[in-house]
Amino acid sequence: MRYEARGTSGEWSSHGPRITGVRARLRDWALAPLAAAQRVRRRVAYAGTRRSCPVCGRSSRCFLPYGIVPRTDAMCPQCGALERHRFVWLYFAQRTNLFDTRPKRLLHIAPEPCFRDRLARHIGAGYVTADMRREGVAETMDIMNIPHPDRSFDIVYCSHVLEHVPNDRAAMRECARVLEPTAGWAMLLVPITAPHTDEDPSITDPAERLRRFGQGDHVRRYGPDYVDRLRDAGFVVEVVRVADVAAPSAALRMGLSAAAGELYHCRRAVDPATTHHAIP
C-alpha cells in the first residue's frame, strides 16, 4: 500500500500505477508548459476578489467545485488547496510556531502538492517528506513502522492518510514515538463521516469498501471517537474548529465551510495518566 497524491488537490490513494525515476521527470518536464498555461487560464477565468486563499495568498471570483460528490466553492483555482488545506494553513499561521525563524524538523507524510514546496522553502533541511512508494519524496516510509529514532521530529503532519492504513493505532503510536516530547506537536487529520468509527479488516473488495467506507481504498470510516484513538496512542488532543480561528465573514471569504472539518492538534502526554484529558 502507498499513500499518494492525485492531481493538485492533495487527495490520497493507495492504488494505481507507479511512475518512477526518469519517466516521472520526463513526464513532469513535458507537462510543465501545459500546467503553466492552465494556471494562467484559471487566473484569468477566476479573476476576482470574493474569495481569498490563505495558502497561496491569492484572490479569486470563486473556488472550484471538487469531490466525488462535487462540493461547490471547494478548490482554490490558483493553488489547488481544498477547504481543509486552507483551514490548517490558517491555523498553522495563527496558532503554531511552524513559521517562526527557529530551526525545526518536520515530518510530512504523504505531502500535499499545495503545501510541499512552500514548507520546503520555509523549513529547509529539516523538512522530511515521506510516502510508501511515491516518487518525489525524501523517504520511502511505512507509517506503521517509522524508521527514525524516538524524539526525532518537532512536528509531524499527516492528513487524510490514516483511513487508508490497516493498523491506524500502530501508526498513531509511531507518530507519538518520533515526536519531541517537550514542545513537539502533531497534526493528524482524518475525514469524520460516521457517528462512530466503522471498520472491518475482512473487507478487501474495493466495491464493498466504497459502499461501506465511502471510497474504494479506505479501510474504515471515522467518527468523533477518533479523538479517543489519538489519546490511547499517547497524545493530549485539542480539537479546533473553524470558529476558533476565523470570524464568520472571514471564514466565508476563505471558503471554510463544514467540509473543512476539525483539526486535531496533538502533543505527547507527559504522563500516561493525562492521556485522556484534552487541552482546555
Image (spheres, helix red, strand yellow):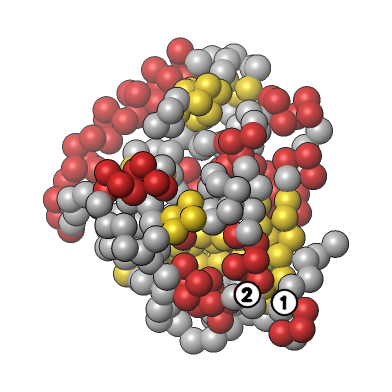
In the rendered image, is residue 163 in sight?
no
Question: Dot 2, crowdedness within 10 Å: few (<14), some or many (≥20)?
Answer: some
Q: Which residue is at 41% across, 47% downward? A: 213
Q: Disc 2 marks which amino acid? A: Asp
The answer to whether residue 69 is seen in the rendering is yes
Q: Read off the residue under disc 2.
A: 232
Q: Quadrant of residue 273?
A: bottom right
> Viewed as shown, does residue 36 lie left or right of 157?
left
Foreground: 67 or 227? 227
Q: Using the image, determine if residue 71 lies above or below residue 14.
A: above
What SS does tag 1 mark?
loop
Residue drawn 48% across the image and 23% down it: 64
Q: Of the numbered discs in the image, which one, if any, rests on residue 275? A: 1
Amino acid of disc 1: Thr
Q: CA distance from mark 2 to mark 1?
A: 7 Å
Residue 13, x across and y down, in percent: 33, 50
